[in-house]
Structure formats: structure tokens, C-alpha cells
Image: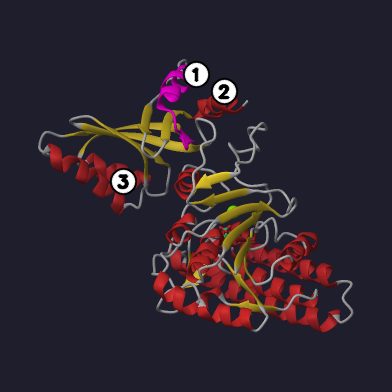
Amino acid sequence: MHILKFGGTSMSDAKTWQQVIDIISRYESPIVVVSATARTTRELIKAATTALDDIEEARSIAADIKQRHNKLVTEFLNDHQNKTPLIENCSTWIDQHIEELNTQLDAINDEQELTEQEKDAVASIGEKLSSYLFAQCASAAGIATQWIDAADIIRTDSDFGQANPDEDYIANQAASLKEQVVKGKIPVMGGFYGMDENGHTTTLGFEGSDYSASLVGAALDAETIEIWTDVSGIYTCDPRFVPEARPISQLSFQEATELAYFGAKVLHPSTTKPASKKQIPVWVKNIFEPDEPGTCISTESTNGGPVKAITYKENCTILTVTSSQTVMGYEFLAGVFDILRWHHLAVDVVTTTEASVSIGIENGANLDDAIEQLNGYGSVDVLNNQGIISLVGCNSDKFLVEDILSQVKNVPQNLISYSKSKGNLNLVVSKDQVLPVVKDIHQKLFS
Ligand code: ASP
Ligand code: MG
């Protein structure tokens, strides 16, 4: 069994839908997980936030989403012999979901409040549309699909916006997907969303469809989990900004997780977790170049060059907290991290001295609140406009110290952390230095 996940760009128009169908047809018993069509999740969130003060504008975003989906379906089914009832069926589905969206938007406007729960309900509409419509159109194009509501499979807790899956429950529910496969059907489900035990829609966080695919793959002991996207795998660096970047043929689960976590946009950071537990290889492949090898992520870690890849985050802050005398040394660090935990802030880079700790952290909505609370705990020094550069899969510390650090010796390093066992080197530099430094290091390592 193979889990095939197709992202937003693969779902964008009638042409890419056909490409996706051609890829699905190459497999004997696939299960398909799809994202919302390109831009839709972002538009939905925009509609929800706009609804707070401009309901007319919010409704016009909803109308645009409706129009785009109707157009996509009509275009795809244009040459189909029996297109009228098929298009009617799809347009009823679209109407129902846009109506549901408008009801949500009105509620947001009436209550003058947008909760995380409402945001999830709105955001999930993208995948509810794309998965059902794609399943209908793919059936019309000759592959026997069965639409599956992800809410029936992906059970999560109620941590809206970033819900945590219940893997045992999912393993049970996933049996129904297998039943469809046995009947000769190709299950098609939306990624990204699920449901909590109270029947409320939840989401797995931004770009969460990859994670959904991995959860389903692990639940079914799939042979492979394949993330089909618009680039030929995971690259040595972001090819949009570093044109010399090239695809990496092989990464370990650990390396791929680090890359995703430290900013590489190809994969949701949690994707590798369920797959690595079951040791199922995760492939990243390109729908436009399906015969290119792509990247294989598995338990193996091949020794290529001294570093596998470079990634970066540009919107970061360094917090340096210095203990006030009243806090004992051993309590100090625990206290600082407790405050960060409370505000759901994940630490990217950390160094400590006896009485202080410096933390590199990605800017987030809760950062200001956390700083305020930390201020009551010790003195806090805030350095804004920072970026974190991460070298992943380092296997030569001599090389790193001599070559990388000397390469960047003219750029002030605001924080450095290196873990030999994890093969990770993180440098924090000012935001405007991030791209030039990344390009320099990439050139040095990969040219
Ligand atoms: N559509 C969702 C998002 O953009 C999930 C995904 O595409 O992975 O976050
Ligand atoms: Mg993606």
C-alpha cells in the first residue's frame, strides 16, 4: 500500500489534477491525501479575520473561493460525455460548504471574536472542498475513488490550530480505508484537518496535510509515504533563493525533521514522526518531473559531503535572561523554560552561563507576553531582527570549525550552538545577513 499526498500546487487547476491522476494510475493500491487547492487555506483564514470588521469583504472572499472551485470542476469535466449531472453534484457540494463558511463568517462578525476553534472550522473547508471534488473528477476520469471524510479517520485532542493526533484511534479507523482498497477503490481524503472527541473540527497546523499522510501511512503499515510537490525533493538549500541548490537523494528521519523544523518549507516538521516509528520510507517527489528520483527519507543516513543541507529562519529574536539574585541557579533554567512552555514557544538555539541563558526563538504571537512574564523572573535583554541559519547532517566537526566559522568570520555571530551527536550547527546572525551568509556557506560546501 502506498500513501500519496498531493499539495496545494498539485491541486491548483484542471491540468495539474490530470497530472495527479496520471501519477495515481501508476500505483496498484494507493491511498490519496490532498491539500486544499492553491491559496485556498490562506484565503479562508483571511476571510475569517476580515469578518471581524468587514463582513461584506469577508463574504466576497468566500464568493471568490466558490467561483474558483466551480471553474476548476467545469474545466476539468468539460470534455466529459456525461458532464451535466457531475458538475451539478460538485456545485451542490461547493454551495453547501460556502454556505457553511458564510454562516461561520456571520457568527465571527456577530460575536466580534475569532476563536482558534472557529479558525479551524473555517480553514478545514479548503480540504473538504478539494478532496471531495477531486475524488468525483478522478472517478469521472476513470479511476475508481471513494471520498473519505478525514474527520472519520484523524482523531485529535482539542488543541485547536495545532491539534495532536490520537494514533491508536487513527490506527483503528484506518482499517476502513483498507476495506475500500480491498474493494478495488482508491480512498481520497483531505489532509490537514481532523476531529476531536466532542465532534469539533481541528487542524494539525500549517501545512499539516503531510502529517495526515504520514499518520495514515503509519496506521496502515504502508510500503511508502510519498509527498508529491512541485520540486524534485528536498534541496541542499531553498532553490528559490540559492539557485545552485540541488536535490538531496537521501536523508535520515532525524535530518529531515531538523531541516523541516529549522525552516525548510517542503515538509511539515511532524511528518517524519509516525513514519520513523514504523520505519516507513518517506519520499518527496515532483508531479511535474515524476521520473526524477526525488528524496528518500528513511532510517539510513548516507555519508555524502560534510553537511547535508542548509536552512534558515528569518524572523527570530534572541532573549537573554539574567537571573535575579533571589532565584537559585538550579531553579532558574527550569523557570525560564516553564514560561516558554506556558506560551507554546519552541526554543531553537540555546546557550547558558552560570546566571544567564540566551535563547534564539522564532517570532510568534505569544512572544511579547512571554517576555513580559520573563521580566518578572530576571532581567531580559531582547535582540530583535535576528535570523537562524542551520547546517543539518554535519559529520565533520574539524571541517565545521575551520571552514564554516572562518567563512563567516566577518559577520557578527550573535549565538552559536553545535551538537556533534545530532550533526547540527546553528548560527544566529542579524536578519539582513542571513541570505548572504547562507549563499556563502552553500557555495563553500556544495560548489
Ligand atoms: N492547506 C493546509 C495549509 O496550507 C494544509 C496543507 O496544505 O498541507 O496549511
Ligand atoms: Mg507542503
Task: Identify which amino acid the numbered label 3 is placed on.
Answer: Ala
Does dot 1 land on a helix, a strand or a loop?
helix
Does dot 2 land on a helix, a strand or a loop?
helix
Task: Identify which amino acid the numbered label 2 is placed on.
Answer: Lys
Is 17 contained in the magenta span? no
Q: Is residue 317 left or right of residue 217?
A: left
Task: Identify which amino acid the numbered label 1 is placed on.
Answer: Gln
Residue at image position (18%, 30%) is: 354
Position in image of residue 87 (x %, y %): 79, 78
Residue at image position (66%, 62%) is: 61
- Give the color scheme: rainbow, by chain, secondary structure or one colour: secondary structure
Q: Which residue is mark 3?
A: 370
Q: Is residue 100 left or right of residue 72?
A: left
Specify which label sits upstream in the sequence, 2 or 3. Answer: 3
Query: Could you say which quadrant of the image residue 54 lies in?
Result: bottom right
Q: Foreground: 238 or 36?
A: 238
- Read off the magenta span: 388-407
Q: CA distance from mark 3 to mark 1?
A: 35 Å
Q: Which residue is mark 2?
A: 444
